[in-house]
Amino acid sequence: MEKKPPQHIAIIMDGNGRWAKQRSLPRTAGHQQGIEACKRAVRSAGELGIQYLTLFGFSTENWSRPASEVNELMRLLRMYLRSETAELHRGNVKMTMIGERDAFSKDLLKLIENAEDLTKNNDGLNLTIALNYGGRDEIIRAASNMALEMQEQGIKPNFDNVQEHLPSFLMTKNLPDPDIMIRTSGEQRISNFLLWQCAYTELFYTNTLWPDFDQSDMEEAIEDYEGRERRFGAISSK
């Protein structure tokens, strides 16, 4: 069977806190090292010829964490955008954000928008960062917006037209569905990430904590993916 590498890799970056705890360090140290792992993942995806990389950076549920940790995560996000936007542009990476933006401060929104604007015409790796994102929230908002538009156009919803048009109202409307989703740290759940998009996505769980994730881990996931037969509900061809 000819190996077909994934076009789109999605990653749930998990294990920063445990990485820090194992070293008797504050959780913030784990998040700092997690930023370095993000940089490595972007470089690795580019070197391995991956077209789309989507990273789950901050969920709608993460706001419930201690304020000090949330503030540190926002600080690290600012630092990443300030230090890496020009580097992403030089690397021909196109960066976009998915998630609800109204919860972020004006200065952070400006940094996000600047990164998107600077890199919007790049045609290398498509990097998507999910911030203040939740899969259920995305689907509810998409369905609500679609219903309003159908009502305005006098269209009566039915199974076929809803199934056809809903994806165009999702935040990922310009992205193909992920071929493989990687979750680090040994946890085996998708945590409200890309629920619609991952209906037939291959799942790969690794015990590697996110701050330790490197190109060899990504290559292992890709090799595992290439050995699978994706049937999308059909019977096996073997």
Image (cartoon, rainbow, N blue to C red):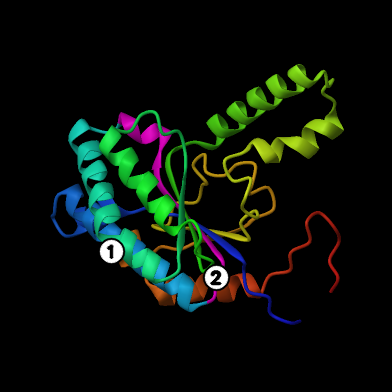
Q: Kindly report the distance in space between the C-alpha atoms of the residues bearing marks 1 and 2.
A: 19 Å
User: Does dot 2 land on a helix, a strand or a loop?
Assistant: loop
Query: Mark 2 or mark 1, which is nearer the start of the sequence?
Result: 1
Expressed as whole percent of the image width and height from the top left, the position of residue 150 reads 76, 23
Tell me which residue sits at (25%, 44%) in the image. 73
Which residue in the structure is indicated by mark 1? 36
> Could you tell me which quadrant the C terminus lies in?
bottom right
From the viewer's perspective, is residue 43 above or below residue 144? Answer: below
Tell me, yes or no, if residue 154 can be seen here.
yes
Q: Which residues are magenta?
A: 49-64
Tally of numbered tags: 2
Q: Which residue is mark 2?
A: 50
Q: Which picture quadrant has residue 42?
A: bottom left
Residue at the image position 85 percent from the left and 58 percent from the top: 234
Q: Position of residue 119 (x, y in %)?
A: 44, 58
Q: Secondary structure at mark 1?
A: helix
Residue type indicated by callout 1 = Glu
Residue 5 badge: none
Q: Is residue 129 left or right of residue 212?
A: right
Left or right: where does residue 80 sit relative to residue 48? left
Residue type, mark 2 in image: Ile
Q: Residue 116, image x and y in percent?
A: 43, 51
- For the residue carrying disc 2, how many other residues have a C-alpha within 10 Å: few (<14), some (14-19), or many (20+)? some
93 shown above or below 20: below
Query: Is 51 covered by the magenta stretch?
Result: yes
- The residue lying at 68 percent from left, 75 percent from top is 4
